[in-house]
Image: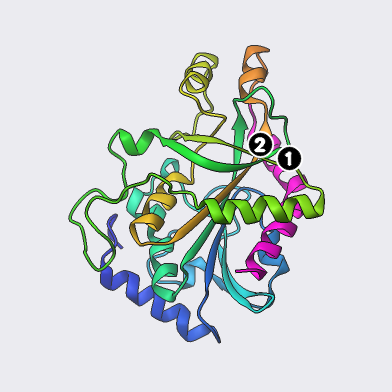
Amino acid sequence: MSTVPSYDEMMSAAEMIAQRIPERPRAAVILGSGLGGVADALSDPVTIPYHEIPGFPIPTVPGHAGELVIGKAGEVPVAAMRGRFHLYEGYSPQQVTFPVRVLRQLGADVLIVTAAAGGLNAEFSPGTFMALVDHIGLPLLAGLNPLLGPNDERLGERFPALTGAYDAELRGQLHTIALRHGIPITNGVYIMLSGPTFETPAELQMLRGFGADAVGMSTVPEVAVARHMGMRVLAVCVITNAALRDSQLNIPAEHKEVLDVAAQAGPQLATILVDLLRDL
């Protein structure tokens, strides 16, 4: 597959998945590093490894299993991606977002994105859940936008607005469900970098100065494509390390720490999201 998948490649992948499942998904969920619990909670699951789906990239990062799980949350059919793709793996923005386009063509009109992120806001400790209210996509602003190139009007308009990209109604439902379970969730702004290097102390100070509360290496390309295709979007990240504070103390970030904290927080996040999916 080329670095810019075609409409026909997208439809081929969607048709292959449709042949393997009893019902098309109403919602799609992207599960970040160590956050696979939503897929485990789905009933009547059908699991399709990514390597069996035409055009799907293969994750190369620990914590990303590389399989699509399609099942039900209550009566709502859901497609959950166990593992996502990143620019730092060498994939193009269009390859990173190809699964979102495929799942939209299958019928999903809601996208829920989860991610692990470093904390920039001093009030956010490891294990904090942050619902995204906005983002700053530095790679996209610098020319790695998945919508670059000819626009296919079958997918969306040429110049989609990202004002209000994160659905306020879905975010409100998330807070209501979290409160019912006694699980605190805060709101904040996420900033994306390409990675794979963790940021220097000076860079982290700059990112906080931009107004960002958390930093990560994913999410924004998928959100841009989802909005291009008219999907409603909810995004939640788990703060896995106090990135800015640790840098000031000369404590280096480690991917193992990210996975460990995400794995500990994952079951609580899965509980909230599965309840939300049931209510769609």
Which SS class for mark 2?
strand
Count the marks: how many?
2
- Look at the image and tell me whether residue 58 can be seen: no
Q: Is residue 65 left or right of residue 152?
A: right
User: Can you give x and y, in whole percent of width and height, for residue 158 in the image?
Assistant: 22, 54
The answer to if 261 sits in the magenta stretch is yes
Residue at horizontal 68 percent and vertical 12 percent from the top: 249
Q: Main secondary structure of the magenta part?
A: helix
Query: Which residue is nearer to you in this view: 210 or 244?
Result: 210
Query: Which residue is nearer to you in this view: 117 or 134?
Result: 134
Which region of the structure is painted magenta?
Answer: 253-280
User: Can you give x and y, in whole percent of width and height, for residue 141 in the image?
Assistant: 32, 35
Tags 2 and 1 touching, CB below 8 Å: yes
Q: Is residue 239 left or right of residue 9?
A: right
Residue at horizontal 48 percent and vertical 39 percent from the top: 134
Front tag of 2 and 1: 2
Quarter of the image containing the C terminus?
Answer: bottom right
- Look at the image and tell me whether residue 100 can be seen: yes
Q: Which residue is mark 2?
A: 239
Q: Residue 98 lies in what quarter of the image?
A: bottom left
Up-down relation of residue 92 to residue 190 (above or below): below
Quarter of the image containing the N terminus?
Answer: bottom left
Q: Which residue is mark 1?
A: 261
Mark 1 belongs to which amino acid?
A: Val
Mark 2 belongs to which amino acid?
A: Ile
Residue at far right of view: 182
User: Can you give x and y, in whole percent of width and height, for residue 93 in the image?
Assistant: 35, 48
Up-down relation of residue 80 to residue 24 (above or below): above
Q: Earlier in the sequence, mark 2 or mark 1?
A: 2
Q: Is residue 175 left or right of residue 153?
A: right
Which SS class for mark 1?
helix
